[in-house]
Structures are given as C-alpha cells and as structure tokens.
Amino acid sequence: MSDPTRTLAGVILLTIVTIEFGGWFLTKIARGQVPMTDFQKAFARAGHAHAGVLVILSLVGLLYVDLTGLDGFWLWVGRLALPVAAILMSGGFFASSAGKNVTQPTKFIAILWVGAASLAVGALTLGIGLITA
C-alpha cells in the first residue's frame, strides 16, 4: 500500500469516533431526550447509517486503489471519491433535516445528491481501473 493511501486510510479510521458520537446521539433521540419530528428521526438514522457504511466502503476501496494502475488525477479520484461521498451523503441527510419542527427536506438535500454523484464516480473509477489493470 502506498504512503498516501495508507495515510488516508488512517484518517478515515479516525472518523469512526465521530460516527460513534452520532450513535450515542441517536440513543438520546430514541429516548426522547432530543425533540425531533418523525421525519428528522428518519433522516438522522439514514445519515448515521450512510456514514458508517460508506466509511467501511471507503476503507475497502483503498485496499484496491493501488492495484488499479491509475495515476495522477484518476488515482486521486479513486482514493478520495468514496470518502467524500461518505461526508456529503451523510451530511446531506443531516443538513436537509436541521431546524425546529422540520417535516420535509430543505434545499440542502442537494448535498446528498452531490455525494451520490461522488459515490458513483468513485465506484466507476475503481471498478474500471481494476478491470483494465
């Protein structure tokens, strides 16, 4: 594993602490200690789940990125697109449901869709890179 990939994997592993904090916060929501609408509760769960799953996917992707034969710009896309998707998709759920008594997504839902695009670009880059290596 190359040094940049290893360093990025270490940084991604450190983000798990923030996901743990989110899980603790979800327990407060579930106990009724944080007033939220049903919509906000659903988006909090979705944001937390997407963060966890996409961080794991990011780490798995890093195991393969150095085997793709990609270089330059596309190598960095392969390294960064999945972790960026984890940030943006989970952030989109949280940002679009923030506020008092929110019952539908706000305009910040766009962050989620930018994250989905990053996920698609990262998966395609890694997949094509591995197939053509």
Image: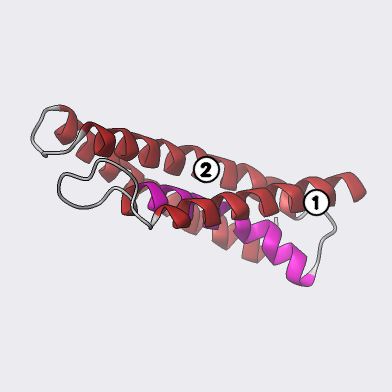
Q: CA distance from mark 2 to mark 1?
A: 20 Å
Position of residue 15 measured from the top left corner of the image (x, y, whole percent): 40, 52
Position of residue 125 measured from the top left corner of the image (x, y, whole percent): 76, 53
Most distant residue in the left direction: 33
Vertical comparison of 46 with 1: above or below: above
Task: Residue 91: say if magenta.
Answer: yes
| Quarter of the figure with residue 23 | top left
Packing grade of label 2 (10 A; few <14, some 14-19, many >=20) is many
What label sits on residue 54 in the rendered view? 2
Residue plotted at (34% across, 47% down):
105
Residue plotted at (21% across, 40% down):
25
| Foreground: disc 2 or disc 1 | 2
Residue plotted at (47% across, 51% down):
112
Residue plotted at (39% across, 36% down):
46
Q: Quadrant of the N terminus?
A: bottom right
Q: Note whether residue 130 is visible.
A: yes
Vertical comparison of 23 with 126: above or below: above
What label sits on residue 67 in the rendered view? 1
Q: Is residue 34 left or right of residue 48?
A: left
Relative depth, front residue between 61 and 9: 61
What label sits on residue 97 in the rendered view? none
Helix, strand or loop status at disc 2: helix
Q: Note whether residue 2 is visible.
A: no
Position of residue 80 measured from the top left corner of the image (x, y, whole percent): 61, 60
Relative depth, front residue between 124 and 126: 124
Task: Residue 87: say if magenta.
Answer: yes
Helix, strand or loop status at disc 1: loop
Q: Which residues are magenta?
A: 72-93
Q: Earlier in the sequence, mark 2 or mark 1?
A: 2
Most distant residue in the bottom direction: 72
The reply to whether discs 2 and 1 touch (Cβ–Cβ < 8 Å) is no
